[in-house]
Amino acid sequence: MISSKQKMPRHIAVIMDGNGRWATSKGLSRSEGHRAGADSIDRLMEVSLALGLESISLYAFSTENWKRPVTEIRSIFHLLVEFIDSRLEGIYKKGIRILHSGSRKRLSSKVLSKIDSAIEITKKNRKLTVNFCLNYGSQEELLTAFSKLSEDRKKKGISVQKPISTKELEKYLYTYPLPPVDLLIRTAGERRLSNFLLWQSAYAELFFTETLWPDFGEKDLKEALDWFGRRTRKFGGLENG
C-alpha cells in the first residue's frame, strides 16, 4: 500500500522483458506478444498519471535488437507507428510528453517522422514524461556524447585536455535534461541491465520481478514503488550522515 507520505522516484526506467515468452506460453506469435506489451504501456501510463509520477523511460528497442529476425523487427516498428497513430491524441489530451532517447541511424524516415511529430505535439505537456528508448544502447550513447563534447570544445577553442565535469557530459546524453534514474524495473525474471541507461542508473534502485511484461499492471508497479519507498538511499555516504 502506497501512503501519501511515501517517497516517490522522480524517474523510473523499465526494461520491458518477456513479450516473446508470454506469446509462446499462449501459443501465439511473437508479434502478438509485442502487441500485448504495447497494451501494458497503456496501463503503465494510466497508473503513472494517477500516482503523479514524473518521468518514465521505456526500453523499447535496443541497438542489439537489430540481430533479431527481420520479420520481427518489421513487426515491432509497424506496431510503434500504429501505437503513435492510435494513441497520440489521447496522450496529448492527458498531458503526457513524449521524448525519444537513442540513435536516429537505421530508423526509417516514416518512423522518425512519427516520433518527431509525437515529440513536437506533446512538447508543452508536463503531467508525465514518457521517454521511449528506441534504437538505444548506453555504451553507444556515451561514445557519442564524448565525441560531440570534444567537437564542441574544438569549435569553441576549449582544450580537449581540460577535465570533463559530470554536468558537462550529461548535456550530451540522449536523456538530457531528464533527472537521474531512481528506480529501474526489469520484468520476466532477468537480472541484468543489458546496456540500458548505465550512466543515468548509477545510483538507481534495481527491482526485478518474475512477471512477464504483457502481464505487468497496476499491482506490479505499486509493489515496485512500495519496495522503493522502504529503501534507504545513501549515495555512498552513511545513513545517519
Image (cartoon, helix red, strand yellow):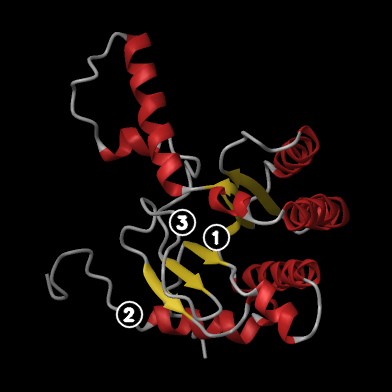
Residue at 44% from the left image edge and 41% from the top image edge = 140
Classify residue 149 as left or right of residue 130. left
**x and y, in percent, of residue 130 in the image:** 62, 55
Q: Residue furthest right?
A: 86
For label 2, count other residues whose C-alpha is less than 10 Å away and answer few (under 14), some (14-19) or many (20+).
few
The residue lying at 81 percent from left, 37 percent from top is 110
N-terminal of the pair, mark 3 or mark 2, is 3
Mark 3 vs mark 1, CA separation in Å: 19 Å
Task: Calculate the distance from the C-alpha at mark 3 to the C-alpha at mark 2.
Answer: 22 Å
Kindly state the secondary structure of the residue where label 3 is placed.
loop
Q: Is residue 206 above or below residue 220?
A: above
Residue 48 picture location, percent across and down: 62, 70
Which residue matches tag 2? 231
Q: Quadrant of residue 139?
A: top left
Q: Regarding mark 1 in the picture, which secondary structure is present there? A: loop
**In the visual, does 163 lie left or right of 178?**
left
Q: Residues within 10 Å of mark 1 (few under 14, many from 20)?
A: many
What amino acid is labelled 2 in the image?
Arg
Mark 3 highlights which residue?
196
Q: Nearer the viewer, mark 3 or mark 1?
A: 3
Few, some or many residues within 10 Å of mark 3 (<14, 14–19, 20+): many
Q: Earlier in the sequence, mark 1 or mark 2?
A: 1
Q: Nearer the viewer, mark 3 or mark 2?
A: 3
Mark 3 is on which residue type?
Phe
Dot 3 or dot 1: first in sequence order is 1
From this view, report whether residue 228 is shown above or below residue 138.
below
Between the C-alphas of marks 1 and 2, the distance is: 19 Å
